[in-house]
Image (spheres, helix red, strand yellow):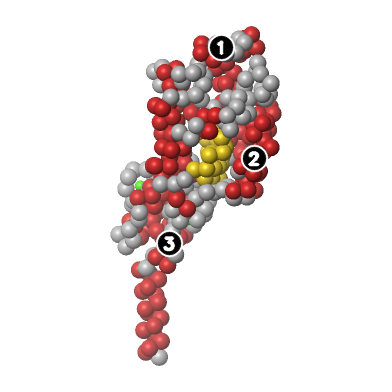
Amino acid sequence: MKKLICCLLAIAIFTAIVPFGVLAENRKYSDLVVVAFGDSITAADKWQTHLEKQFGMNIINAGISGDSTNSAMPRFKSAVLNREPDVVFISLGTNDSAIDMAKYVPIETYKANLTYFIDECEKIGAKVIINIPPPVVDEIYLTRHDSTPFEPYGGPNGLVSLYAQAARDVATEQGVFYTDLNAAFSATPDYTVYFPDGVHPSDTGYKLYADTVAPVFQKLWLGDVNLDDTIDQIDYLFIKRACFNTVSLTNEEFSRADINGDSAIDYIDYLLVKRVCFGTYKVQ
Ligand SMILES: [Ca+2]
Ligand SMILES: [Ca+2]
């Protein structure tokens, strides 16, 4: 009997002290399958490189130059879904808005295509981030395009702005995160310096692009300390134990545990995650 009590006591102490993660190592960003689905801005593989360094992960480049949501549609299954991704960046829209060209996609079709992409990703459990189309520089863009079809919209960038808003609307309606690259570039003192050919970012432009995407990617996993796609009592206990210094978190686990983003893990973080578990708080 004494032996049994000792044994039960040992188990109780073990489960109280030893964090669940010791038994099965937590997933890391480097374990994720991340796909960037897009056009030439993605095909250049530059904004992804910054993120790969920052998060220690690989991003599969599924960008094809010149693609709109229509022309990318036939390869969506093979380039994205068949890879069974954890995260999909969808970065399309600039080519859709090229109203003077055959690749033009009307805005309602663009919205329907984005909605389809999101739905299909969610069916296989992939998280989606919509990268909002960045602005274009009219003066340079119009050296290669006929200005007439753009006039009702105040120029090419006026039309891109409508597609940017359409993408925001779809993301909001579908409840997925988006990276507002259009707003980020437009908010700089002179965004035109970032687009030497009027459409594609320069190296500093790609850095700004990546710096805008990074916090959104991070937010995608906020609260999910062990990166198992669920925020539950395991995450709560990780945060609580980190708070009491009975478990040490890696840097990336720390960033996912710091719910309120104040660079500290304390009772506010574990109370917020507890509320997420009970459905009374949503990580925004
Ligand atoms: Ca989790
Ligand atoms: Ca915190």
Residue 91 lies, in percent from the top left, at 55, 33
Q: Is residue 154 left or right of residue 259?
A: right
Mark 2 and mark 1 lie on one chain; the one further toward the N terminus is: 2
Residue 119 lies, in percent from the top left, at 65, 42
Which residue lies under the disc numbered 1?
142
Amino acid tagged 2: Phe
Which residue lies under the disc numbered 2?
76
Circle number at residue 87: none
The Cα–Cα distance between marks 3 and 2, rounded to whole angstroms, is 33 Å
- Please rate how many residues cluster around mark 2, counting C-alpha atoms within 10 Å: few if below 14, some from 14 to 19, many from 20: some
Which residue lies under the disc numbered 3?
25
Do the CB atoms of the residues marked 1 and 3 lie less than 8 Å apart? no
Mark 1: secondary structure: loop
Q: Is residue 265 left or right of residue 39?
A: left
Which image quadrant: the N terminus? bottom left
What is the residue that sits farthest to the bottom in this orientation? 1
Residue 27 lies, in percent from the top left, at 45, 56
* In this view, 16 is above or below 54: below
Mark 3 and mark 2 lie on one chain; the one further toward the N terminus is: 3
